[in-house]
Amino acid sequence: MLSRKVVEIGAGRGFFKHPQFKPSGDSPDVPVMPETLLLLELNAQACSVDLREMTQVVLGDPGATIQILREGGRECSFGEEPPNRIEDCISALGVRTCIEAVSRRIVSRAMNKPAIMRAWSHSRKIAETCKLIAEEASQNIDPDEAYLTGLLHELGTLPAILDWAPALAVSSDPVLTGLRLAEEWFLPQCVVEYFSEPGHQRGVGRWTGIVQRAHEISESWSDGSQFDGKQESRVVAFGQ
């Protein structure tokens, strides 16, 4: 049984809605890795559910994150603000409802599993780097929001990765697709803002700048570089 209270969401965090799109609610469920579901089930069977551990499991899987945020948004009454954090969703919905949400569609061999695994792995890597940048920056940037933005920064590519039917196509532009899905799925304001920022491809906005910098750092690590003092200085300099 959950012992942690739901954290009250600040009244000033209004959910942004772009007037160009009207959510249809017809988009398919996003698949979740089977190991994510297994870990959540094991956590739920414990004598005392560890909310923090369950939250970390969900945030390690973009599909599970989306499914639970979507469920949290669906449960909101008219005019009520959707939860911005996974722990709030779990507390409000209950463990069993969250597990049902993530179990609706599991990644299987019938899907393009290698492509999904690559996309999920890349999203986690960028999310972790975005959080590091936010923690080191002098700007007032919430590390958890930075992580979530990085985790869902390729939202607009999901229709292609998941082979959605042409009738479900949102737009040929992944940025507009990401914005539409972020709104339709009741995703947190930071994610909506990321896809709404002008000059998106140039990385000149608050969130796009962090995500772009995260890609640069991630690429340097992939080249065999270590995160040394010079790289740390450049991360800190981002917020100055």
Image (cartoon, helix red, strand yellow):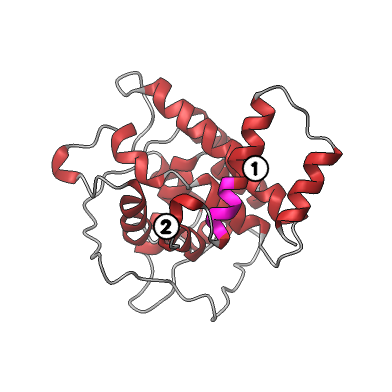
Q: Does 230 lie within the magenta span?
A: no
Quadrant of residue 128 within the rendered picture? top right
Report whether 160 appears left or right of 225.
Answer: left
Residue at image point 59% right, 44% down: 127
Which secondary structure is most common in the magenta stretch? helix
Q: Say which amino acid is labelled 2.
A: Phe
Residue 25 in the image: x percent, y percent?
24, 57
Residue 47 visible to the viewer: no
Residue 200 at what x, y percent from top left? 45, 55
Residue 33 lies, with reference to residue 193, above or below; the image says above
* Disc 1 target residue: 128
> At 33% across and 69% down in the image, what residue appears?
18
Is residue 236 at all visible to an observer of this figure?
yes
Comparing 61 with 52, the one in front is 61
| Quadrant that contains the N terminus | bottom right
- The x, y position of residue 233, in whole percent, is 81, 47
Image quadrant where one finds the C terminus = bottom right
Disc 1 marks a residue whose amino acid type is Glu
- The residue sitting at the left extreme is 167
In this image, 19 relative to 237: left or right? left
Residue on which disc 2 sits: 195
Q: What crowding class fits label 1: few (fewer than 14 Cα within 10 Å), some (14-19), or many (20 or more)?
A: many
Residues in magenta, as a range: 207-212
Instruction: Tell me residue 154's x, y (percent).
Output: 43, 43
